[in-house]
Image (spheres, coloured by chain):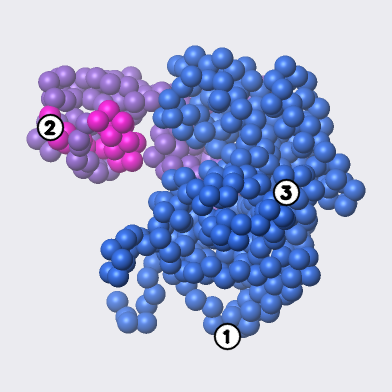
């Protein structure tokens, strides 16, 4: 049995048609049910749909053999014990540093609001910039406005939310898109099952 | 917190768990003794410089403390291999020496979620032979150890870090850039490699792109030979893997190959090998060649060996 972990939400809407093209379909009744492990059109493949941030954890520990997760999540998690075999080119966006103006970044110790704590810390450390990270779970754009932080590190798609809150994307940390990841041990022990899937998906990209 | 509570990542074996562990430990030591591997019991604590070699990963995982008697820094062993290097150098022998050990070690952080910070490392090491028969001997012993632990079937994966190292030696890039490239290879990220090669000019860009894809059955070795036909160092390494494959086949051992494999310790210099089983999400045993590991102790010799966490694997019986 091959278990594939998929990320819930926007990324799932773009993942399902891709998998369908590669020959894997999940019936609507399955998707609409409250079950956590879903059957597919293939007897030896099952799918689990979980929070995006949990996908690398499930794959790393072998609870799923493969998974589809955003590069932002993989960067933040550290992604040990898994191979990042394909860039699926879906769910594209950017991880950026945003502030009200460039001057706001000129601080001895920069206060940064983000949910991407590890990625932000690594980025500013590599730049030689001292920083203090404030972890927030949402409404990041509010932090500079109310004086909680000098800048934010967050994903940007169209940039409309930043604009509406008077922020400008000043530095790009990483170009983000969804990746196909495989557990290292599954890659070795289930190679004959997994490799055709990688090749199938690669062909349709 | 109750006084009986153990620190995070520290565990113990009791009752049947302890009995099964002890029975397996004795059987393994008998197996190693029968194959001519002499038992060593290195100290739990020694001078930190002796324990670290040049490995940042071992450094990060080593508990350190100040010796009130000498005023020097001591370390608690997080890996037995550097200690064997010291023991072999001290012995000063020029002939083949074989060592085995089963010791508790301590790590500042566990290798992964399922691992303990206090594993019991079992392993065997062979010093003084650069011949592939030495690698085959330790691979065979590693597989016999896992068989004794009733773990089967085993998927044996072979690679050789010397190809990557030879390609890197021809590039004029900083240590930071090499670290970045090693990380990309460790997670076999072809998308990240493409971005990396766009941002960095490398002489061997094409060969790196091929190398990351070279995995599969023994047929990939002939493919690799064709790709690296103009690169003598890599060619020699691949020919070595073909020779090892032949010797393993004679003994009825089948291997798969992964030429981009860099996941082993930083001190590995040549062939690396890992054992997998479909019921486990990580490598069960790992090893490889680390020629020259004893250099800092004044005796640079060829060396090859393997190790695994016996405490973790003995628990698969429950």
**Secondary element at tag 1:** helix
Q: Is residue A116 magenta?
A: yes
Chain given the colour blue: B
- Per the rendered image, the range of residues in magenta is A107-128
Label annotation for residue B152: none
Please determine if labels 3 and 2 lie on a single subunit. Answer: no
Residue named by callout 2: A108
Relative to residue A153, is residue B10 drawn left or right? right
Q: Is residue A202 above or below residue A3?
A: above
Q: In front here: B51 or A114? A: B51
Q: Are marks 1 and 3 on the same chain?
A: yes
- Asked if the stretch drawn in magenta spans residue B233, the answer is no
* Element carrying mark 3: loop
Tell me: residue A115, above or below residue B252: above
Q: Colour of chain A?
A: purple
Instruction: Note whether B91 is above or below A93 in the view shown.
Output: below
Q: Along the polypeptide, which appears first: circle 1 or circle 3?
A: 1
Q: Which residue appears at 83% of the width and 47% of the height?
A: B248
The residue wearing badge 3 is B129
**Rendered image: mark on residue B15:** 1
Mark 3 belongs to which subunit?
A: B
Same chain under badges 1 and 2? The reply is no
Could you tell me how far apart the alpha carbons at marks 3 and 2 are, in whole angstroms?
Answer: 56 Å
């Amino acid at each position: 049995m091959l278990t594939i972990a998929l990320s819930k939400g926007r990324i799932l809407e773009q993942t399902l048609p891709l998998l369908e093209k590669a020959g894997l379909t999940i019936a609507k009744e399955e998707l609409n049910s409250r079950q956590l492990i879903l059957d597919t059109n293939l007897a030896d493949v099952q799918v689990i749909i979980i929070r995006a941030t949990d996908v690398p954890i499930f794959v790393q520990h072998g609870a799923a053999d493969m998974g589809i997760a955003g590069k932002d999540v993989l960067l933040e998690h550290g992604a040990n014990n898994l191979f990042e075999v394909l860039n699926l080119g879906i769910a594209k966006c950017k991880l950026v540093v945003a502030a009200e103006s460039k001057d706001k970044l000129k601080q001895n110790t920069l206060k940064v609001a983000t949910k991407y704590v590890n990625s932000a810390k690594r980025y500013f450390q590599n730049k030689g910039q001292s920083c203090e990270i404030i972890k927030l779970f949402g409404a990041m754009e509010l932090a500079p406005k109310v004086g909680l932080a000098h800048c934010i590190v967050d994903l940007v798609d169209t940039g409309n939310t930043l604009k509406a809150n008077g922020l400008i994307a000043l530095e790009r940390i990483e170009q983000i898109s969804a990746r196909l990841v495989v557990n290292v041990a599954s890659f070795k022990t289930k190679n004959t099952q997994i490799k055709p899937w990688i090749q199938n998906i690669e062909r349709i990209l | 917190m109750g006084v009986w509570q153990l620190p995070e990542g520290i565990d113990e074996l009791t009752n049947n768990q302890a009995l099964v562990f002890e029975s397996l430990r004795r059987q393994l030591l008998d197996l190693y003794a029968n194959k001519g591997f002499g038992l060593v019991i290195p100290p739990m604590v020694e001078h930190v410089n002796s324990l670290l070699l040049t490995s940042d990963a071992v450094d990060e995982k080593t508990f350190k403390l100040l010796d009130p008697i000498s005023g020097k820094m001591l370390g608690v062993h997080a890996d037995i291999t550097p200690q064997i290097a010291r023991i072999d150098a001290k012995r000063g022998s020029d002939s083949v020496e074989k060592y085995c050990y089963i010791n508790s070690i301590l790590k500042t952080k566990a290798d992964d979620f399922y691992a303990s910070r206090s594993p019991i490392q079992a392993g065997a090491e062979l010093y003084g032979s650069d011949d592939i028969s030495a690698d085959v001997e330790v691979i065979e012993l590693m597989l016999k150890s896992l068989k004794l632990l009733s773990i089967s079937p085993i998927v044996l994966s072979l690679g050789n870090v010397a190809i990557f190292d030879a390609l890197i030696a021809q590039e004029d890039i900083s240590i930071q850039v090499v670290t970045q490239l090693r990380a990309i290879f460790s997670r076999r990220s072809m998308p990240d490699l493409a971005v990396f090669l766009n941002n960095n000019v490398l002489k061997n860009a094409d060969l790196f792109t091929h190398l990351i894809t070279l995995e599969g059955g023994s047929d990939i070795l002939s493919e690799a030979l064709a790709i690296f036909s103009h690169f003598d160092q890599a060619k020699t390494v691949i020919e070595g893997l073909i020779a090892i494959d032949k010797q393993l086949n004679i003994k009825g051992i089948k291997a798969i190959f992964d030429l981009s494999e860099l996941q082993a310790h930083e001190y590995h210099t040549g062939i690396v090998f890992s054992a997998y089983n479909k019921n486990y999400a990580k490598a069960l045993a790992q090893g490889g060649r680390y020629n020259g590991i004893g250099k800092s102790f004044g005796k640079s010799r060829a060396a090859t060996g393997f190790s695994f966490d016996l405490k973790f694997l003995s628990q698969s019986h429950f």
